[in-house]
Amino acid sequence: MMIEVKFLRLAHGADLPPPDYASAGAAGLDLRAAVPIDSPIIIPSGGRALIPTGVAIELPPDHEAQVRPRSGLAANHGVTVLNSPGTVDADYRGEIKVALINHGAETFTVSRGMRIAQLVVAPIARVFLVESASLKGTDRGGRGFGSTGAL
């Protein structure tokens, strides 16, 4: 399924490539860091930073965009998206920014144009809640974390 999503390049991201799929089978568009070329963002071990992408989008109604980590940054550096997945709502028109956290032992440098996250666009279902005095039972019931097997 292909849907049209308009995007706006902001002034500080004008020379960067637009978000794009790294391969034909990729689920997410790569988001790039729109930090000044002479002012990379340094994230110390245990630190976090909000990274601009220089991009705003216009999602169709009943869609969301999820900002997700890049596996290479996580595996190689311990860097991931802090509020993963971050949700971009269909009515948001501001710049997409990515909250990165450095769980690695080394300082991490975010430089201009670096691929820092993925953007996955998906349809959403709107629900209406109906208050009830009880819920149908299941084998699992109310058992939470780890209740369906070993962690």
Image (cartoon, rainbow, N blue to C red):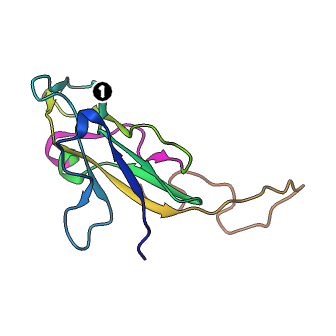
Q: In which quarter of the image is residue 52?
A: top left
**Few, some or many residues within 10 Å of mark 1 (<14, 14–19, 20+):** some
- Residue at the far right: name it: 133
Name the residue nearer the viewer: 91 or 23. 91
Give residue 42's position: percent from left, percent from top: 17, 24
Q: On the rendered structure, is 79 left or right of 125?
A: left
In the rendered image, the vertical position of residue 33 relative to residue 22, given as above or below: above
Image point (63%, 54%), residue name: 143
Q: Position of residue 115 (x, y in %)?
A: 19, 47
Q: Is residue 21 above or below residue 1?
A: above
Residue 149 visible to an observer of this rendering: no
Does residue 125 lie above or below 49 as drawn? below
Between 35 and 115, which is closer to the camera in this rendering?
A: 35
Magenta stretch holds residue 76: yes
> Residue visible at 29% across and 38% down?
54
From the image, which quarter does the N terminus lie in? bottom left
Question: Quick check: 14 above or below 59?
Answer: above
Instruction: Specify whether residue 75 is in view.
Output: yes
Label 1's element? strand
**What is the count of numbered marks?**
1
User: Can you identify the residue that label 1 sits on?
Assistant: 49
Q: Magenta region: which residues?
A: 75-89
Q: Name the kind of residue labelled 1 in the image.
A: Ala
Task: Specify whether 130 is left or right of 51.
Answer: right
60 and 129: which one is in front? 60
